[in-house]
């Protein structure tokens, strides 16, 4: 029967043809161009318009950027140099002299210049302290102990003062822990917890000052103190941002748990707090920090404006953080809670071992974007008169030498923020990929 | 053996408040409530003591004293002898104005950029990505002051428009003047005006509503309503017979013709700005601060909205597009009938929070001197009267009320478009 086919069809191919290379227009650069830029007349027009636009922008920006005004001491001098080169007008060329003249100020504000090593060291140590948290598998495990003591080192490095103060603040934690262990033996965990907190509070509020003062008089050891009003520039933004971010995460978790809990009164306090903070602009909270916070405190209290701003920024961020984490908690399947219950775990064990690790993982993108938002919002402190980069830029533009400068100054500040925020968002993407252990 | 199942002696002991799970929740709550009340009480007593020491007992009478400062961008009548309350109202209206303008512009730009970011054209997609990353990763306050600085430094001053050979000329058929003090655009005028509607008497909160404006709105609403009826009738006919009657000229007519008739009857014309002396007169004047704030806020928020739109469109599974194509729908109809209605459900909740953010960010107007609620009530009024507690609290409550009402309205809308699941 096999030959019937041969009789009806003249030719039957019995071997495969060798593969041919695809046409030159479908592969390589040309293929890519055809697929991505010139597929159809509409896309071609779009491409041409886009090319024209890019050319237009670059033809203005590149000559402007390449401008030999690095050494100029004032805007008029810059304009003189540019005039000699024959380029004038708004986009004749950048005046980089202002950056050379003021970049140190934009970074450090009025921090004493012989102490610049301290904020720099604090930043480097921050990177070291963050490494075990951010890139856990690439660094030694024991570094996490350094992360734990870093919160006490950083304020000491920045503000200076006696070395005993941070040590005694840290000792407060030990006091609280000892009280907890002592009571836990006889009185049960809840009572012990209360006792621990009370003991630590008493230590911080009443004993801290005398004890660290006493130690200081015996062994005077410390760094030169720096006033808060000397803080400024990008360092100030980083300080406010990092401190507020670090404190707002645990606060946000507590608020989110409070909002999710069955305890009606706790829940309504948390909901009220979160919705109030989220309903008002940050600038009004900063007004509270600058005008009202001292009124709310006992008469005679007068604490530092930066501290007040940090408190309000922390409260602000923690409300947003709480909502992000609540989203993560809500996204967990009910079965996880029930599974934890069926294992006999109590509330805190279930939260620590089952719920939080998963909920936090889900909410990472939201947490990082809250961080980014808070960091960008630190610029608002310029409105209440702190000298962050934006506050300084107003002062620089009011200086007669640099009156009329726009793009160079703001471009520099924008670049600083862009680098920080962009790398944070890239890190969050990396983390999302790394933590994606799910069933997708 | 029965003794094991017997209920234990239920006499109440104090320790059960902590160790019995039935009572523990109540104990914790009572403790929390008491500590919360103590905290509040402590703050209030501190505040009362401090204010007494300063000689400033809380009182809102300052709201009815003359403000004594001028507001240059305003929607309602205001002069420097108006009370502080009216200054706050002017500020509130300015806040709402920038919020509405900003939300509208941000939505348009954001949707456009979001769709273009998904374009198959590599170059266009990259440009849009660049725009989004650039605006998202730089503080909005920086954008606001940068735009303000650009407007002041690079635009011609009104003086440049003068003389035989002026350095600057007006744009768009000599109707728009763009200067470094602000932009003057033609204003709508009615030569046979219907007059104004006076609201709330002559008190601090009184304001006028132009009846012409109301009439135009009423005619437009009626026109769109009739047009909607024509559409639903056409739908009914199409469902019954399969043939859709041509209705576009009818639908256009019922909206446009009454409007034109009304405008002619009211004697509608445009008032153009003209250079008189050292400055422009006539036309609607938008100050630089308003324009800088508007551009910065809408471009900044648009970057976020673009990401939301992109995410919403990507969230619709590709099978939907393919199924629609299999039904024979064209590309544009697939977008409008299949993809967008579903994407909207994903897009709207985060879009609401972006609108809220924009409204709250509008309080940064104080950085460029646009007189919004922060600038009037919490700015100059605070400085002049020294009543920080009252002004800041009032300001916060007003912002809270705005935020809550926006989210109420938007949540109601969200509920309407939400997928009804079984």
Image: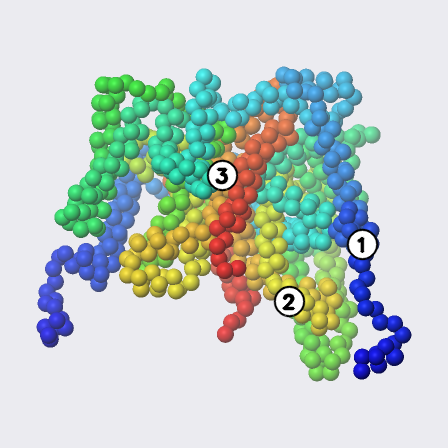
Label 3 or label 1, whichever comes before in sequence order: 1
A195 sits left or right of B77 in the view = left
**Which label belongs to residue A375?**
3
Q: Residue at x 54, y 63 (%)?
A: B413
Disc 2: host chain: B
A119 vs A225, nearest the viewer: A119
Q: Residue at x 78, y 30 (%)?
A: B167
Using the numbered discs, state the Cα–Cα distance from disc 3 to disc 2 in whole angstroms: 40 Å
Q: Which mark is residue A333?
A: none
Q: Circle 2 sits in a helix, a strand or a loop, which is it? A: helix
Chain designation of label 1: A
> x%, y% of residue A186?
14, 48
What residue is disc 1 on?
A: A21
> Colour mode?
rainbow
Query: Marks 3 and 1, Cα distance to the nearest angstrom?
Result: 53 Å
**In the shown orientation, is residue A86 left or right of residue A409?**
right
Q: Is residue B111 visible?
A: yes
Toward which corner of the image does residue A199 lie, by quadrant?
Answer: top left
Would you call the spot at circle 1 few (<14 residues within 10 Å), some (14-19), or many (20 or more)? few
Q: Is residue A209 above or below residue B417?
A: above
Cα separation between marks 1 and 2: 32 Å
* Circle number at residue B319: 2
| Callout 2 crowding tier (Cα within 10 Å): few <14, some 14–19, many ≥20 | few
- In depth, the one of B163 and A68 nearer the eye is A68
At mark 1, the secondary structure is loop
At which x and y percent is residue A222?
33, 20
Say yes or no: labels 3 and 1 on the same chain.
yes
């Amino acid at each position: 029967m096999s030959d019937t086919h041969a009789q009806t069809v003249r030719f039957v191919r019995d071997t495969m043809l060798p593969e041919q290379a695809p046409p030159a227009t479908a592969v390589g650069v040309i293929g890519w161009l055809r697929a991505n830029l010139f597929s159809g007349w509409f896309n071609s027009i779009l491409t041409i318009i886009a090319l024209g636009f890019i050319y237009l922008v670059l033809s203005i920006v590149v000559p402007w950027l390449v401008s030999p005004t690095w050494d100029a001491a004032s805007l008029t001098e810059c304009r003189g140099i540019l005039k000699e080169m024959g380029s004038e007008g708004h986009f004749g060329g950048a005046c980089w002299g202002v950056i050379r003249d003021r970049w140190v100020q934009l970074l450090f504000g009025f921090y004493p210049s012989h102490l610049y090593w301290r904020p720099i060291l604090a930043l480097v140590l921050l990177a070291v302290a963050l490494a075990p948290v951010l890139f856990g598998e690439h660094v030694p495990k024991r570094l996490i102990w350094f992360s734990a003591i870093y919160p006490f080192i950083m304020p000491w490095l920045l503000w200076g003062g006696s070395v005993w103060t941070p040590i005694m603040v840290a000792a407060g934690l030990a006091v609280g822990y000892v009280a907890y262990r002592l009571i836990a033996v006889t009185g049960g965990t809840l009572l012990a917890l209360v006792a621990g907190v009370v003991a630590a509070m008493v230590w911080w509020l009443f004993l801290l000052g005398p004890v660290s003062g006493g130690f200081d008089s015996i062994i005077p050891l410390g760094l030169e103190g720096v006033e808060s009003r000397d803080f400024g520039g990008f360092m100030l933004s980083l300080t406010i941002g990092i401190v507020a971010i670090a404190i707002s995460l645990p606060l946000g978790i507590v608020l989110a748990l409070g909002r999710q809990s069955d305890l009606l009164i706790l829940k309504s306090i948390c909901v009220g707090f979160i919705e109030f903070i989220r309903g008002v602009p940050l600038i009004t909270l900063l007004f509270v920090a600058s005008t009202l916070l001292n009124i709310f405190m006992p008469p005679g209290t007068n604490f530092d404006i930066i501290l007040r701003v940090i408190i309000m920024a922390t409260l602000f961020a923690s409300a947003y953080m709480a909502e992000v984490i609540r989203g993560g908690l809500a996204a967990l399947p009910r079965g996880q809670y029930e599974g934890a219950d069926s294992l006999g775990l109590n509330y805190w064990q279930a939260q620590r071992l089952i719920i939080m690790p998963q909920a936090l993982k889900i909410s990472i993108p939201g947490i990082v974007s809250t961080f980014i938002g808070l960091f960008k919002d630190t610029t608002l402190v310029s409105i209440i008169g702190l000298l962050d980069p934006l506050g300084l830029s107003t002062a620089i533009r009011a200086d007669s030498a640099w009156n009329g400068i726009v793009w160079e100054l703001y471009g520099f500040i924008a670049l600083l923020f862009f680098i920080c925020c962009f790398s944070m968002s890239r890190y969050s993407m990396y983390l999302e990929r790394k933590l994606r252990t799910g069933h997708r | 053996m029965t003794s094991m199942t017997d209920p234990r002696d239920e006499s109440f002991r104090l320790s059960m408040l902590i160790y019995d799970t039935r009572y523990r929740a109540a104990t914790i709550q009572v403790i929390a409530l008491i500590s919360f009340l103590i905290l509040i009480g402590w703050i209030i007593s501190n505040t009362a003591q401090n204010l007494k020491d300063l000689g400033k007992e809380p009182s809102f009478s300052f709201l009815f004293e003359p403000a004594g400062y001028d507001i240059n961008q305003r929607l309602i009548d205001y002069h420097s002898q108006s009370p502080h309350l009216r200054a706050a109202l002017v500020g509130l209206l300015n806040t709402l104005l920038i919020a509405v303008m900003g939300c509208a512009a941000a939505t348009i730009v954001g949707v456009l950029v979001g769709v273009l970011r998904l374009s198959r054209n590599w170059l266009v997609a990259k440009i849009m990505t660049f725009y989004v990353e650039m605006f998202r990763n730089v503080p909005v306050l920086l954008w606001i002051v940068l735009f303000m600085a650009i407007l002041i430094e690079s635009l011609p001053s009104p003086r440049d428009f003068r003389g035989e050979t002026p350095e600057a000329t007006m744009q768009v058929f000599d109707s728009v003047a763009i200067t470094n003090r602000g932009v003057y655009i033609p204003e709508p005028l009615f030569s046979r005006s219907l007059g104004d509607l006076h609201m709330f008497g002559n008190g601090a909160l009184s304001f006028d509503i132009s009846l012409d404006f109301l009439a135009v709105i009423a005619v437009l609403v009626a026109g769109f309503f009739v047009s909607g009826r024509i559409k639903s009738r056409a739908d009914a006919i199409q469902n019954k017979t399969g043939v859709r009657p041509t209705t576009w000229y009818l639908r256009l007519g019922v909206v446009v013709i009454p409007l034109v008739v009304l405008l002619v009857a009211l004697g509608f014309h445009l008032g153009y700005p003209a250079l008189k002396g050292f400055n422009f007169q006539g036309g609607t004047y938008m100050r630089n601060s308003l324009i800088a704030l508007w551009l910065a806020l809408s471009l900044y928020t648009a970057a976020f909205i673009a990401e939301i739109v992109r995410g919403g469109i990507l969230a619709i599974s590709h099978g939907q597009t393919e199924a629609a194509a299999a039904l024979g729908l064209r590309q544009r109809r697939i977008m409008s009938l299949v993809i967008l209605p579903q994407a909207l459900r994903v897009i709207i909740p985060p879009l609401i929070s972006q609108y809220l953010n924009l409204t709250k960010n509008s309080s940064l107007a104080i950085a460029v001197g646009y007189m919004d609620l922060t600038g009037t009530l919490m700015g100059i009024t605070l400085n002049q009267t020294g009543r920080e507690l009252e002004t800041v609290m009032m300001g916060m409550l007003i912002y809270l009320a705005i935020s809550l009402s926006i989210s109420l309205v938007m949540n109601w809308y969200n509920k309407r478009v939400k997928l009804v699941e079984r």
